[in-house]
Structures are given as C-alpha cells and as structure tokens.
Image: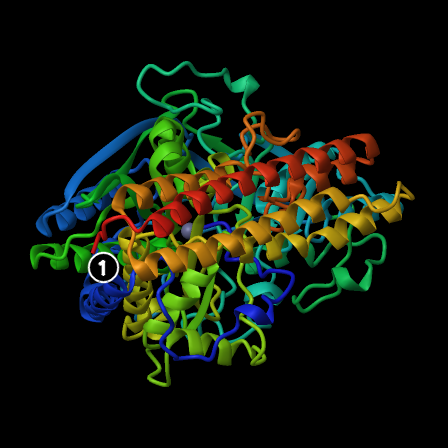
Amino acid sequence: MRTLLVAALFLACTWTARSAGAQQPLVGYTPASAAHEREVESDAIRRPDPSKAATFSRELSREVHVSGTPAQARTRDYVIAQMKSWGLETSVRSYDIWMPHPTEVRVWRVSPDTLRLNLVEPPVPNDPTSALPQYLTVNGYSGQGDVTGEVVYVNYGLIEDYAQLDSLGVSVRGKIAVARYGRSFRGIKAREAERHGALALIIYSDPQDDGFVRGDVYPAGPMRNAAGVQRGSVLNADGDPSTPGYPSTAGATRVAESAMEIPHIPVVPMSYGNAAELLRGVRGAAIPQAWQGGLAFRYHVGPGPVKARVVVHDDRATHPLKPIYDTFGVIRGSEYPDEMIIIGGHRDAWGPGTADNVSGTVSVLETARAIAEQVKQGMRPKRTIVFATWDAEEWGLIGSVEYVEDDSLRLTKNAIAYFNQDVSAQGPRFNGGGSPSLRPTLRDVARAVPDPNGKGSVYAEWRRASNTPASLEPVMGDPGGGSDFAPFYNHLGIPIAEWGFGGAGGVYHSQYDDYNWMTKFGDPGFLYHAAAARVAAGMVLRLANADVLPYDYAEFARTMRRYLPAIDSGFARRRWSGNATAPLSAALDRMEEAATAFGSARDAALATGAAKDALAETNRALMRVERALTRNEGLRTRPWFRNLIYVADENNGYANMALPSINEAIRRGDEALASREIADLAERFDNATHAITDARRTISAVSSTGQQRDR
Ligand SMILES: [Zn+2]
C-alpha cells in the first residue's frame, strides 16, 4: 500500500440520505429477484469466519514475503491451494520485472565524529516474528552509490519546502538531504531531491507522524518505536519501468535502464532513532516553526556541520529481472459468464505484512470461500467473479498493472467493476470509497453487514464514528492512486470501489507489521477481517446477480458538479475569461437528467418484468458510460492515465486531483488549453449521457411492449 483512502473534499448530499437500518428496495432487481438476492446475500454475509481469517493471517505472515523472493512464491502456492480446495478454477500469470534487490545499505555519520548507524529493526520482547530475517532498509528502486556530504534537513521534501530553502539561501546540491515522511508520496520526495541536486536522500519517520507523539510505541502500544522503519518504493510510474504501457511478458522488448523513469540517487528510509543521530548536530539558518518535528531538540536546516556517508548497492548488474506471480480464482457465472466482477488485493509486503497486505489477501480468500460454499449448495452467481491476488504492488502496483496491460481488451469489454482490498483490517473504523457510480451500492451493502462491535450495522457505525449529520452521507474517498485499483480505473475507466477498517498504528512497511501486532492492537479477534469479507461478499453478489447493473449516474453527475467552483476560481485567480465551466455545468445537467429518467424507466420495467435480451442490451449500454470518460491519448502529463475524472496529483502522489485534464492546464497557466479541455470533457460527458439514454431507450421499449417475463 502507498496510502489509505484520501478523504473526499465534501459530503454527499441530502437527497441520497436514508434512515439507517431500513430495508430499501434493491436497485436493479425485479421484485422476485430482489427477495431472492436478499436471501443469497445474507447467507454469504454470514459465512466469513474470524477463526479461519486468523489462520490465513498467521500462515501468510509467517515469513517476510517481499516480491521476487522465494517466500513470496510460497504465498502464491498457499493462496492457490486454498482456492483449489474450495473448487475454484485457478490460474497464475507470471511476469518478469526489472526490479533490482538491494545487496548492501549502510549509513554513517562521518563528521564531527564517526558513528555507523545500525539500520536493522531489532527484535522486541515476546514477539517471535519480530526476530524473523528481515529485508534491508532500502527504498524500492533507489539508485546506487557511495556518497558523502553535509546534511540538509528539507522538512517533508515537498516542492514548496525547496522553495522555502531557496529563500533561506540553502541548497541541497552536493549534500545529503534528510526529509521526514508524510504529506506526499515518497517517490515525489526522491524526485524533488534529485532535481535539486542532492547526492542522496534519507527519509525518516518523525515521531510526530506515527511515533510517540501519537501514542505508546510498539510493543507497549501500536505506534512506531525509535527503531521502526518505513520501507517503500520510490518509483513514480505505475508498472514495470522497463515495459512502460505494455505487459512484461516473456520476450517483451525492454527499454534501456538509462531511459527508464527511475530515481538515480541512493534513497534510504530510516527510523527516528537513527535520524536523530544526524539531525541533532545540524546547525545553520533558523527553521520556520512548522518545520519543527517531534524529536527532543531544536531542528535546523544546515548545511552541516554534520556530514553523512550513504552507501547503497543492488543486483541490477547481475540479475535485475525477477519473476512475479498474480493468482486468480474464478467462479463462472451461470447466465453471463463473460461478464466479470473482479476483487483483488496485493499479496506482497515489506515485512511479515500482517496488515499490509495479508489482511486484504485474507478478505479476498474469505470472500472466495463464502461464494464457493454457496456454489456447492446450488447458488451460483449469474456473472463471473474473479478473486485475484497481485504481486509487486509495493514496488509500484506492478502485478496489477502488468495484468491489466496484458488483458486490457477483455477487461475493457467485460469488466463490470473492480473491488480493491488493501489493508482491509487494522482497526475498528470503516472507510469506503471509489467511483461515485458505485458509492450508493457500497452504502447499501454496509447497511446489511453487522458491525463487529455489536451496536448496529457497519453503515450505522460508520455514520456514528464519523459524526455524520442525519441529513448527509458519510464522506467517501475518491480514487486517486496508490493501490491496485489504479490500472483498472486510471488506465481503462472501469468503475472501482474499496473499503476497509482502519485504526491507530505506526508499523506501516515495518518488520513490526506482524501477527503479534495484529493480535494485540490491530484486530485481536479477527472480527474486522471477517467484516471486510462480509462487505465484499455482499458487493460481489450485488453486482454479479443484478438484472440491471446498479451504477448510479445521478450521484455521479452531482459529485462532478461540486468540482466546478474550484475550476472557476482557478480561472478567476488568473484573471482569465469568466463563466468558464458553463459548458461542463450544462453537460452535467443533461447527464443527471438522463440518469434520473433512466432510473425511473428501469424501476418501472423491473416492476413489471423485462426480457432477458433487453436487460443484457441495457447493461451493455451502462458499461459504456464510464468508458466514455476516458480518452486514448490520456492526460497530457501522463498518457497512460486515460481516465479524466480522478488521478493522483503528479506533484504529490497521495493527494487526488479531480477533472485532471482541466486542472493540470490551469496549473500550467495555459488558458487556451484549459478552455479546450473543458470543451473536450463536456463532449465526453455528453457521450456518457448518450450511453445512459441508450440504456433508457432499451429498457423503456421493454416495459412498454410488455414482452415475456424473465422471472
Ligand atoms: Zn498495501
């Protein structure tokens, strides 16, 4: 995982609010099929088992399973064996990835005195897994080198932090930059340090971020201790950097290392215990107050007088390519076997990975087991469900990206939705998000799943814990980037959703993200692991069995409309021509109107019965709606990103940008381009509206001619 869901900027509006707990009609189902579906879903929701989840969790976190290692091949075999034993059709897709593994990482303080830093995370008492052999503390895709220089503290290493350093007259050129984690994706920190001429970058976990400032540290509490290290990739592109835009299959053409979009300087993650040994003696200009972190001394930016030496070497010269393995378990649909609902989570980790992402893998497994048991009892879903686990997510979403690039034609034609499970259980607080078209379905399924605290549904507890006013819906996350939904969503425009249970923790990408931490702090009874799988079982069945796919394009259009004021104020700030978003606003009015009309026609048709052929045609039209909001040439900044609705901000990596084709043009200061992008997107919204109108026409014809009833 790179990041958890990023909170949406606004609350969903009142017209979708419903009283918690009330039984609602099932959107997209005839009355008869709705009653049956409620039974099938509640049966499936009952099946996930906390004790089975605990067993899977313990087995899958028994070893450190970094992508490209033999231990990670063993998790492939474990997952496949489980799925086979439940009767799923299984397969493995393997790709060869340019993924150097570190062979050496060392850091010294060399001035004013010499101190070799111990970068290892030591075992803690009463936690056997903390003593497992561990992976070196290097950031994935770090450059190699042996460099020495004065230390400069760069705060979070954001673009604006370097601007601040400029104003202080301090440069990192020829120096060792030390940045704290937080506020941006670490790959952006590496890119900016390299752009500004640093010899190397050290990224450390400040206690203010997830250490003792936030709570007791492991093993006394869940937060990061003085030796805890956040590993993680510093690759900014998604997928294998040697095969940009196409799959890393056997014999694939590869770009030369010199042409890859990868960091070129050593980048080393560090604990705050070690970072203090470097930062304590740094002097120089007074820092802005906001740059002070949680260590017990006054921070300074330097440069020096402390000097450091950083050494990183890897195996790129001898064997840079590593095999990775995505696993698939398939339950064929009875009526629409070509149409697929895919649920997946990444199977690789930086340590034992009990939260990130054994918990997501366990949710996928328990969901697969629940549905497979139903199939044995004669309850087969109408559409095909694919249960996937991805390799090498931690290195840059590589397993899912290579798969999507490999299977893009089939996915574009047949994928109904992709559901992502990344850190699905490490605490009690529910979070959900995804494409606005699927949010009402996720809320509805969350109403049907009991919260493990016994006080009500997951939905009711979600509202309560987030203090959501009665007239509103809980805030949901937008799909930006940072996990395996990205290729499905950003590259192909497939609707996605994700959810999970979060909580306080400071073991992200550390050796201490282990079974002992999970059983003491994260999810002691594995009840939330099971609850994530219960939501998943409801979600896959709801989409798999629908007579009409329950995408909500009225909520979608309303959500989009809320992004227009920011565009208008962007224009106003630059004193560009007024009323810029009028074409978009009009297109969204047409989209919402068409979606509302479709909803009425759908409900009328389903109430009186509808022919199966016409329903299938309606569904084909609905599947075109979000595909119409992509474009083949992608974003001007990043052609691989074809979806024009949400993307990770190219200058942050964690923050989301909505309507990026327009907002990136505004950021560039190009009024003509911004206006062209508005016209382009308005036209695409109209194309989406045409697909909705086609769906309405198809289903209206059904109800008005009173064709034979399907059920
Ligand atoms: Zn993860």
Give the residue at x 40% y 67%.
444
Q: Residues within 10 Å of mark 1 (few under 14, many from 20)?
A: many
Please indicate, yes or no, whether residue 385 appears anywhere in the rendered image.
no
Of the residues shown, which amino acid type is indicated by label 1?
Glu
Query: How many badges with numbers are in the image?
Result: 1
Pointer 1: what residue? 366
Q: Is residue 68 left or right of residue 169?
A: left
Quarter that holds the C terminus: bottom left
Q: Is residue 687 left or right of residue 668?
A: left
Helix, strand or loop at mark 1:
helix
Considering every residue shown, the one lying at the far right of the view is 575
Considering every residue shown, the one lying at the far bottom of the view is 455
Q: Is residue 247 left or right of residue 41?
A: right
Colouring scheme, one of rainbow, by chain, secondary structure, one colour: rainbow
Residue 521 lies, in percent from the top left, at 38, 73
Residue 98 lies, in percent from the top left, at 41, 26
Figure check: 68 above or below 215: above
